[in-house]
Amino acid sequence: MVKTSIYGLNKQDLIDWFIEHGDKKFRATQAWDWLYVKRVASFAEMTNLSKATIASLEENFDFSPLKPLVVQEAKDGETTKYLFELEDKLMIETVLMRHDYGLSVCVTTQVGCNIGCTFCASGLVKKQRDLTAGEIVAQVVQIQRNLDEQNKGERVSHIVVMGIGEPFDNFDNVMKFLEIVNDQKGLEIGARHITVSTSGLANKIRDFADRDTQVNLAISLHAPNDELRSKIMRINRTWNLEKLFAAVHYYLDKTNRRITFEYIMLNDVNDHTEEALQLAALLKDIRHLAYVNLIPYNPVAEHDQYSRSPKKHVTAFYDTLTKQGINVQIRREFGTEIDAACGQLRTEKMKELDQLKK
């Protein structure tokens, strides 16, 4: 029997399970505290629950669905990358980043990706399945537990849902994950400290707006016109800029919350003044709620047709947007020397395993 991860239950789910099994509501609250405040590593450590309750939990639920395979830390100590093995032996990546405002975890939502961005390491392996809510939550818990073991008093304060996969292609599980990590009696990560990034599934952007979660939204734009965007991002052939920005306007009208537009700088592809002016024009009527994040490209060996934009291109692009009244920043780099682009570490491990089979 494949067990459900205990981390996939929100608080009400846990309460319902305890009551259905003849236990009291407050026992579920105690179990929740063990999971997310004390962050124990097994059901057996929940010492104020009865042996019968612990046995029932062990019978019905998997405790942690993740097995750490590789941990890579950048030389500057600001980035740590984790390769986890799931129960079905598939692998995912999670990244811890240290910012001046706190510790941020970048979580993965799918095994592989079907979006088809031609510059991205995540899509080197096609989507094999969605992650469950429990598998996404467990990434944050595992890293927080590792921080606890270091006894530095450090706490994950921010989450970015920008790892392998398209979060809105796994919408229901991602939304449940957000509810669980946001719980004020648990990990207590504020909604405004969480950002979900989508490649542009316009229908799901509307659904996300309707949820009114206070969670931040980022859109991976990467090109300011349909011809170029369709060339480097296959998703644009389904959800072109007209459809995408109709959904953006719906989101802004519904929430009045700022959107971040992510823009990876690809040398001589999307980094000219022409594209900067097109981007400014695209955002002109929403610029009071638009924020552009220019991202240095992390090279991917399998996509050697792309290279990083030189500094002068990035600076000129930035200056053009600024002069057009667009809010823009250049994102600080993290962990280039540890295969920081999502999917790279997993791809290297898969190649290693393939070699062992030969």
Image (tube, rainbow, N blue to C red):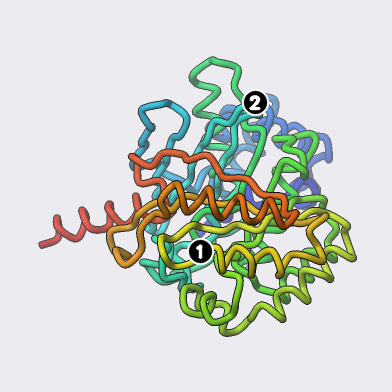
- Residue 172's spot in the image, x, y percent? 69, 65
Left of 141 or right of it: where is 92?
Answer: left
- Residue 286's spot in the image, x, y percent? 81, 63
Rendered image quadrant of residue 356:
bottom left
Rendered image quadrant of residue 125:
bottom left
Left of 346 or right of it: where is 291?
Answer: right
The residue drawn where x is 62% and y is 37% is 54
Q: The residue tagged with tag 1: helix, strand or loop?
A: loop
Give neighbour class at mark 1: few <14, some 14-19, many 20+ (Cα, 10 Å).
some
Residue located farthest toward the left when viewing the structure as drawn: 358
Q: Amino acid at mark 1?
A: His
Task: Let me know if residue 135 appears in the view.
Answer: no
The residue drawn where x is 58% and y is 37% is 141
Q: Amino acid at mark 2?
A: Lys
Which residue carries the number 2 mark?
A: 38
Which residue carries the number 1 mark?
A: 272
- Residue 112's spot in the image, x, y percent? 44, 65
Give neighbour class at mark 2: few <14, some 14-19, many 20+ (Cα, 10 Å).
some
Rendered image quadrant of residue 347:
bottom left
